[in-house]
């Protein structure tokens, strides 16, 4: 069963750019519509459009994903929300406590996406100076401790990065479902961590998925998409987006003839470069290829968020349901 999650904005204005200043004698009613209103509209669109979930990605320059996830969970009834964060955000005990509260309030609809291999400059800006294999060793301990205090009332752990003495949750936090853990990466350390802790391992479109063996782990895919009524219209929109983001007409990239992936996407959230462009039928066929290769969870990325969420939900997801990709 394939599941489809939409990636939502992690910046206050939804990526629309700064608002121009108005003269002092002009009343601007837009001030009553804040960044969380835009976020909640995007989340509402995801639920109405029948997406299985929404991703609030880790973005070092954006809003805190767990706060955004809490708002999305509060205003939705069944939407699962994946909150992206890195292990340096807090102790695993505190991260688990926040998440146990969110599970209690939302009916167990919170998931985690742990960002382990941050760019060193980004990590240092977050106050995190671990590098190399130490990042995966800490993530291993982080997840071990978080699961330990979640499931045991008298939990003790003495590790390299974390120590806990007689910890663990009692009522009302005890007994909730632990968030599904999403991890990513193709290095040896990343795959070993996923083998031990991941429920979902997320790949990029160009990764060699068939070369990876993770028994019991769902394979996910972060996938930028641009779909319209026909291929010509979709590529015309792609050209406009390319020029709008600083590309030149003579440097407009062609899709890869082997994979059909277009490298012109600029994904702020995940960093994925390749994505699918074309008619709804063309994009659906490309997604079906990945399902046949073993992918069971898709994280679709498309902007502007609200408009594209409705568009994909109305036109793309029904095609996938018809083709047997049991949309949940």
Image: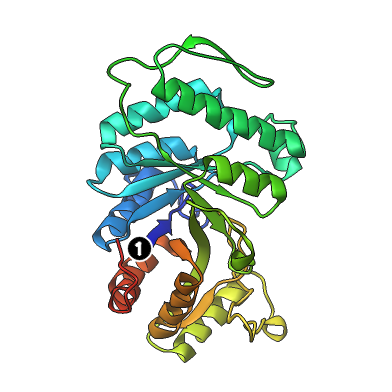
> How many numbered marks appear?
1
Q: Which residue is mark 1?
A: 1
Q: x%, y% of residue 64?
A: 49, 37
Q: Quadrant of residue 208?
A: bottom right
Q: Quadrant of residue 211?
A: bottom right
Local secondary structure at mark 1: loop
Apparent side of residue 12 relative to residue 74 in the rendered image (left or right): right
Classify 10 Å Cα crowding around label 1: few (below 14), some (14-19), many (20 and above): few
Q: Is residue 3 visible?
A: yes
Q: x%, y% of residue 22?
A: 45, 52
The quadrant of the rendering that contains the N terminus is bottom left
Q: x%, y% of residue 306?
A: 36, 61
Question: Of 210 and 120, which appears nearest the observer?
Answer: 210
Task: Please tell me which residue is depicted at 59% across the width and 57% down the height of the picture.
Answer: 213
Q: Quadrant of residue 205?
A: bottom right
Apparent side of residue 128 relative to residue 37 in the rendered image (left or right): right
Q: x%, y% of residue 154?
A: 43, 11
- Answer above or below: position of 221 versus 177: below
Question: Of 327 and 153, which appears nearest the observer?
Answer: 153
Apparent side of residue 164 relative to residue 187 in the rendered image (left or right): left
Task: Please tell me which residue is depicted at 47% across the width and 46% down the height of the picture.
Answer: 199
Residue, far top: 166
The quadrant of the rendering that contains the C terminus is bottom left
- Answer above or below: position of 253 versus 65: below
């Amino acid at each position: 069963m394939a599941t489809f999650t939409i990636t939502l904005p992690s910046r206050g204005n939804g990526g629309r750019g700064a608002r121009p200043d108005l003269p002092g004698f002009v009343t601007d009613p837009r001030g009553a519509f804040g960044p969380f209103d835009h976020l909640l509209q995007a989340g509402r669109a995801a639920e109405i459009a029948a997406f299985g979930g929404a991703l609030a990605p880790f973005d070092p320059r954006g809003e805190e994903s767990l706060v955004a996830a809490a708002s999305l969970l509060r205003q939705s009834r069944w939407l699962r929300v994946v909150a992206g964060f890195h292990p340096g955000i807090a102790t695993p005990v505190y991260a688990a406590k926040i998440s146990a509260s969110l599970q209690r309030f939302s009916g167990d609809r919170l998931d985690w996406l742990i960002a382990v291999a941050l760019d060193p400059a980004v990590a240092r800006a977050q106050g995190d100076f671990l590098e190399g294999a130490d990042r995966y060793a800490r993530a291993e301990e982080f997840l071990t401790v978080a699961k330990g205090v979640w499931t045991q009332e008298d939990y003790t752990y003495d590790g390299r990065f974390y120590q806990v003495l007689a910890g663990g949750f009692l009522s009302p936090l005890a007994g909730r479902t632990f968030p599904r853990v999403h991890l990513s990466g193709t290095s040896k350390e990343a795959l070993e961590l996923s083998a031990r802790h991941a429920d979902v391992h997320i790949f990029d479109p160009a990764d060699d998925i068939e070369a990876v063996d993770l028994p019991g782990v769902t394979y996910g895919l972060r996938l930028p998409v641009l779909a319209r009524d026909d291929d010509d219209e979709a590529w015309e929109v792609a050209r406009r987006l390319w020029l709008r983001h600083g590309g030149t007409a003579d440097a407009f990239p062609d899709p890869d003839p082997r994979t059909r992936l277009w490298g012109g996407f600029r994904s702020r959230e995940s960093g994925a470069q390749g994505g699918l462009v074309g008619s709804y039928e063309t994009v659906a066929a490309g997604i079906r290829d990945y399902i046949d290769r073993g992918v069971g969870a898709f994280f679709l990325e498309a902007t502007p968020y609200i408009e594209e969420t409705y568009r994909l939900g109305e036109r793309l997801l029904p095609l996938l349901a018809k083709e047997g990709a049991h949309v949940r």
